[in-house]
């Protein structure tokens, strides 16, 4: 795990009800580099995780939902037979916030367990 990812996993998401600007490209680039496997698609970041079977994919999905609940920041999840695609963006600001990267780092930590 990168130093950036370790730092992010120690943080807690801050409530975001809008009224703040999304992160700039200059702010996003180093955060994204610190999260190998994650990519950017416009206003969101995403990663696809692969598993042995559907049971493992579902178990991971449930764990991601637990993190989402604790952080009060919820991803868009696409679950296949043995894949889970996790997408984050902050709806209230129609872009990326630090919360998205905090949660992405925590999801990666789950995957490494």
Image: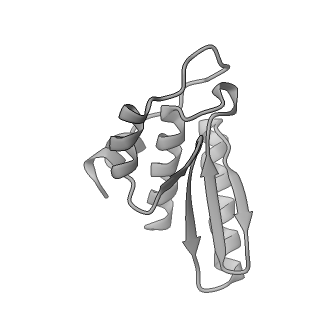
Instruction: Work out which residue is located at the far bottom of the displayed protein and give it.
Output: 52
Q: Viewer-proximal residue, 1 or 98?
A: 98
For residue 80, what is the image quadrant?
A: bottom right
Is 77 on the left-hand or right-hand side of 43?
A: right
Q: Is residue 56 above or below residue 61?
A: below
Q: Viewer-proximal residue, 3 or 89?
A: 89
Is 110 on the left-hand or right-hand side of 10?
A: right
The residue at the point 54 percent across, 20 percent down is 21
On the image, the x and y values in percent for residue 93 come to 64, 26
Q: How is the image coloured?
A: one colour
Q: Is residue 112 above or below residue 33?
A: below
Q: Viewer-proximal residue, 25 or 33?
A: 25
The residue at the point 52 percent across, 32 percent down is 97
Image quadrant for the C terminus?
bottom left
- Tally the numbered discs: 0
On the image, the x and y values in percent for residue 28 come to 41, 38
Is 16 on the left-hand or right-hand side of 112?
A: right
On the image, the x and y values in percent for residue 53 come to 66, 85
For residue 15, what is the image quadrant?
A: top right
Image quadrant for the N terminus?
bottom left
The residue at the point 28 percent across, 54 percent down is 2
Is 1 on the left-hand or right-hand side of 51?
A: left
Instruction: Work out which residue is located at the far top of the displayed protein and give it.
Output: 19
């Amino acid at each position: 795990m990168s130093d950036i990812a370790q730092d992010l996993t120690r943080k807690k998401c801050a409530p975001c009800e809008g009224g703040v600007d999304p992160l700039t490209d200059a702010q996003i680039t180093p955060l994204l580099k610190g999260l190998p496997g994650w990519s950017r698609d416009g206003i969101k970041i995403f990663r696809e995780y692969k598993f042995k079977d559907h049971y493992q994919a579902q178990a991971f999905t449930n764990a991601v939902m637990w993190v989402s609940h604790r952080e009060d920041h919820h991803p868009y999840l696409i679950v296949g037979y043995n894949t889970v695609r996790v997408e984050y963006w902050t709806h209230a600001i129609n872009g990326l916030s630090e919360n998205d990267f905090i949660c992405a780092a925590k999801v990666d930590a789950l995957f490494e367990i």
